[in-house]
Each structure stands twice: as structure tokens, then as C-alpha cells.
Image (tube, grey):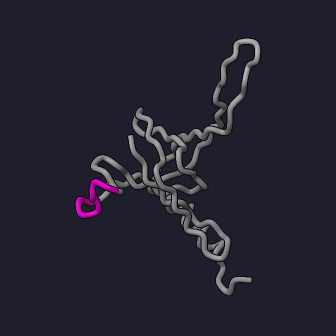
């Protein structure tokens, strides 16, 4: 059992993300379904909303290898996964990396790198 109350830290992080961020809509591909009559495969998705803070990368962080010009950093009060999609200012972005802050098994928030 952890000696530190990470649940309280999680609640503080969520409160700050809610206060300084905005609610964003995400979608995640959950699988495929096959229609034997038409012979087509259709992707199935699930949608969810989460509070998030949208940040631009600083110029010195852009290396045009891992972080490309135009990428953004998003701090999300939820668990996001690589290839999830997020809509921001009417445009769809794809999560290219997702790094949860997860001390002692308590997910505080997820830092995601997104790309158009």
C-alpha cells in the first residue's frame, strides 16, 4: 500500500484540468464487424468526452523526428490510447503517444502527443 495519498493528487489534477482546460470529444476504434451478406468490414468506435488542457510544444522541443511542427501536447483527465482521435477547434487529431502518470497504480492524468 502506498504511503502517499495519490487519490487526493488525482482529484487535484482533475480539478485543475477542468478549471484551466475544456471538455474535448474523443473516439476510439474498438474493433471491426463483418457483414457476410455484403462482404464488407466496418470499424466500430466508441466516443467519450474528457476534460483536457491543450498546449503547443515549445520550439526547442520540436525535433522533426519524434515531435513534429504542428504537434500538440494534451493533458487529459482520462485514460487515452495511441490512435484515439480527438476533435479540437473543429479539426480531428490523432494520438501518437500516450503517457499516463501512474504512481502506485493510480492514474493521475495522461499526457498525449497529438497530430493532424
Determine the residue located farthest toward the left in the rendered image: 59
Q: Is residue 111 above or below residue 49?
A: below
Q: What residue is drawn where x is 41% and y is 52%?
A: 54
- Residue in view at x 51 percent, y 57 percent: 98
- Vertical relation: 75 (above or below) 29: below
Residue drawn 69% across and 83% down?
2
Residue 67 location (% of width, % of height): 34, 55
**The N terminus is located in which quarter?**
bottom right
Residue 72 locus on image (x, y percent): 37, 51
Tell me how many marks there are. Answer: 0
Q: Position of residue 110 (x, y in %)?
A: 53, 60
Image position of 53 (left or right of 56): right
Which quadrant holds the C terminus? top left
Is 63 part of what is drawn in magenta? yes
The quarter of the picture where residue 90 lies is top left
Q: Is residue 91 magenta?
A: no
Image: magenta residue range: 58-65
Residue situated in front as seen by the camera: 8 or 32: 32
Is residue 10 positioned above or below 81 on the image? below
Q: Which of 26/53 is in front? A: 26
The prevailing secondary structure element of the residues shown in magenta is loop
Amino acid at each position: 500500500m502506498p504511503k502517499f495519498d495519490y487519490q487526493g493528487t488525482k482529484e487535484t489534477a482533475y480539478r485543475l484540468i477542468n478549471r484551466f482546460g475544456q471538455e474535448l470529444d474523443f473516439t476510439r476504434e474498438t474493433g471491426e464487424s463483418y457483414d457476410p451478406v455484403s462482404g464488407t468490414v466496418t470499424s466500430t468506435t466508441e466516443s467519450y468526452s474528457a476534460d483536457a488542457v491543450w498546449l503547443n510544444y515549445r520550439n526547442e522541443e520540436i525535433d522533426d523526428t519524434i515531435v513534429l511542427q504542428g504537434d500538440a501536447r494534451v493533458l487529459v483527465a482520462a485514460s487515452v490510447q495511441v490512435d484515439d482521435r480527438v476533435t479540437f477547434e473543429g479539426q480531428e487529431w490523432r494520438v501518437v503517444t500516450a503517457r499516463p502518470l501512474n504512481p502506485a497504480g493510480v492514474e493521475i492524468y495522461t499526457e498525449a502527443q497529438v497530430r493532424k
